[in-house]
Amino acid sequence: MPRKRAGGDSDDLSTRRGTLNEARWEAILGAAAEEFNERGYRAARLQDIAQRVGLLTGSLYYYIDSKEDLLYALAQSSLQLGLATTIEDEPLANSDAATRLHAFIQRQMQIMDRLRGPAGGIGRDLASLSPDHRQQVDSMRRQLHSFVRRIIEQGMKDGDFDPTVDAGVATNTLFELLNTTRQWVKPGRLSLSEIGDWYARLLLGGLVLRESFGRLPSSM
Amino acid sequence: MPRKRAGGDSDDLSTRRGTLNEARWEAILGAAAEEFNERGYRAARLQDIAQRVGLLTGSLYYYIDSKEDLLYALAQSSLQLGLATTIEDEPLANSDAATRLHAFIQRQMQIMDRLRGPAGGIGRDLASLSPDHRQQVDSMRRQLHSFVRRIIEQGMKDGDFDPTVDAGVATNTLFELLNTTRQWVKPGRLSLSEIGDWYARLLLGGLVLRESFGRLPSSM
């Protein structure tokens, strides 16, 4: 259903554009992502986004009310993909924390090519979202972070991970690594899956109980 | 010496503004950093930067030719601070790789409060630098990255670190962690020094030879 008839349902962009051209909407989102990444969200202009997909600026208004709708749709789509990676089958859900973390990291690496929010995460542009949209995005981010944090806490409870580590900081660390990957990764060197193995090794290396280390200097 | 008389010496902003008001220049840089962080470099306006320090926009032109000069000066100042952290006294320079990495990370945490480039690093705004300035900044970044990479390679050569790790990827990882710290760190939780210890633990946990690990799942 076009935006103009959506009435109060302003937070569900996917319902709103149900009867519009889905392929064109995807193209618009792709163009917005490129424009935001190249120029930054604030400097990006709707007319340049429209031009990238061969539309008149006016035609964009069948899909959105404002540039901010595009930022929100991109953030929402990335976070929906992200939250899908928290789904575990039963054997995995019953595995130890290290196995679950490693599997989560690999599932995150698998969606990386499809993420369209700003590389480096949406943190910097969050302030540009309307209060409603920001609340939605924040809540999805919290859900994603909680998933990792609970795994880390499970590992501490099970005696696999060092309970003196700050689980919140460890969680932030992982998401900073994941979110910045697209900024520096170059095709043809390491695969995303190999980088995922490295992140898992790094994070688990930081989390496992100190007694497991033989070679760290005593000052550590 | 004011910008207008600098002639061909356009890459050395510090010489150029030698006879100008140094405190005011620092205030201008601080205001530019805030404006760039809040609005993004491209959307930031010189008149807003001038207003933050109580100057007319025209007065900024005693110090700079363009907004790009401010981005360059900020990047240069952050990288100069960064490069200063690669200076080691003789005992440290002769220490093992783990000790040197840990010390480097802690020195990086110590300068974090004084960094004024965009939080998250200058990667996203690099494309906005003029070719000359970009080359300068790239060369300083390469110097900083090489320092870490050489330490990691030393550790591999000495048999402390796993030689199958990609030293370049490990180096990038560390700088992504360092550069994104200012985006999420909140005062009063962990100190910067404690976060530095965590980063060192994480990185060394990822680098040390696999035989040192007792608790990692076999799939790792």
Image: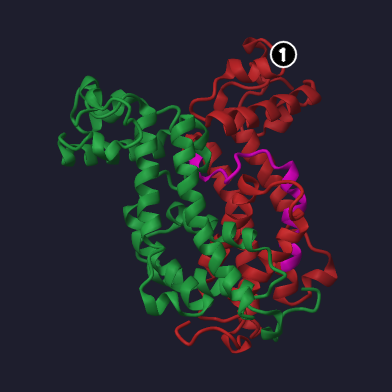
Chain colours: A green, B red
Q: Position of residue A205 (x, y in %)?
A: 60, 75
Query: Badge 1 sits on which subunit?
Result: B
The residue identified by callout 1 is: B54
When the figure is inspected, residue A200 is found, relative to residue A144, above or below; the finding is below
The part of the image, by quadrant, that contains residue A61 is top left
The answer to whether residue B143 shows anywhere in this view is yes
Q: Which amino acid, mark 1?
A: Gly
Q: Position of residue B105 (x, y in %)?
A: 71, 61
The answer to whether residue B131 shows anywhere in this view is no
Query: Residue at coordinates 77% horizontally, 22% vertically from top-left?
Result: B24
When the figure is inspected, residue B57 is found, relative to residue B41, above or below; the finding is above
Depth check, front residue: B18 or A149:
A149
Does A128 appear in magenta? no
Depth check, front residue: A73 or B82:
A73
A154 left or right of A189 in image = right
Does B104 appear in magenta? yes
Question: From which residue to which does the magenta span run?
Answer: B102-126
Query: Residue at coordinates 70% horizontally, 74% vertically from top-left?
Result: B97
Magenta: predominant secondary structure element? helix
Q: Position of residue B26 (x, y in %)?
A: 75, 28
When the figure is inspected, residue A56 is found, relative to residue A187, above or below; the finding is above
All told, the count of numbered labels is 1
When the figure is inspected, residue B16 is found, relative to residue B84, above or below; the finding is above
B73 left or right of B90 in image = left
Q: Position of residue A2 (x, y in %)?
A: 20, 28
Quadrant of the image containing the C terminus of chain A: bottom right
Query: Residue at coordinates 63% horizontally, 22% vertically from top-left?
Result: B64
Quadrant of the image containing the N terminus of chain A: top left
